[in-house]
Amino acid sequence: MENKTPEADVEVVRLILEMRHNLNDGSLQTSHRPASDTDAEVMGGWPSGGLAQAGHSLFVEMLRHEAYLLALVTISERENGSAEPLDRKDLAERVRLRLLRMTDTFIDAACEEVLVRVGALATPAVSDSA
């Protein structure tokens, strides 16, 4: 697949998001990677090898996904008799609150996993008293 678009100076990279849902305890593990060797090669030419761009892209998609989900919930509530308005400012606040709750729930496990993965690269902090 060609990674150039008709737009000038635009490269397209596809990512695969893999989700593993544990049917016993409901836990979810995720990972992502370039969809092809060509996608990986294109990302390799970007600053930081595409790490920042991939992270930002996944973050924006998460924001859109949560906004979409919460918009549907609000519309559903309205159709069931609630007169609650649906506007950008209200929806943005709902998304912010949801993300804060989700962050509190998942941040420790995510950081622990990253530290395990990069453990060989991590160096101990240098003490000022040494």
Image (spheres, rainbow, N blue to C red):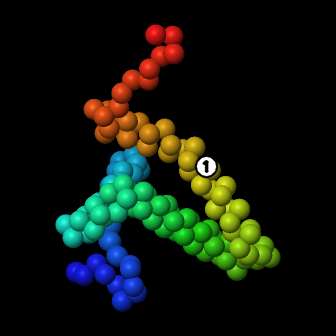
Q: Is residue 108 left or right of residue 54?
A: right
In the image, is residue 82 above or below residue 113?
A: below
Q: Quadrant of residue 119?
A: top left
In the rendered view, would you say 111 is above or below 70? above
Nearest the viewer among 94 and 50 is 50
Q: Please name the residue that numbered disc 1 is placed on.
A: 101
> Which amino acid, mark 1?
Arg
Residue displayed at 57% across by 72% down? 68
Given residues 129 and 99, the one toward you in this image is 129
- Locate the N terminus by quadrant: bottom left
- Residue 55 falls in image quadrant: bottom left
The vertical placement of 98 against 34, above or below, is above
Q: Position of residue 46 (x, y in %)?
A: 34, 63
Where on the picture, by quarter, is residue 34? bottom left
Q: Is 15 located above or below residue 23 in the figure?
A: below
Of residue 94 and residue 54, the one placed in the foreground of this image is: 54
Q: Secondary structure at mark 1?
A: helix
> Residue at coordinates 40% horizontally, 61% vertically from top-left?
54
Please provide percent x and percent y for residue 77.
Answer: 69, 73
Left or right, 84 with respect to 39, comes to: right
On screen, residue 27 versus residue 95, left or right, reads left
Instruction: Locate residue 60, reporting x and y percent.
Output: 51, 65
Is residue 117 visible to the viewer in this orientation of the structure?
A: yes
Crowd class of label 1 (few under 14; some 14 to 19; many from 20; radius 10 Å): few
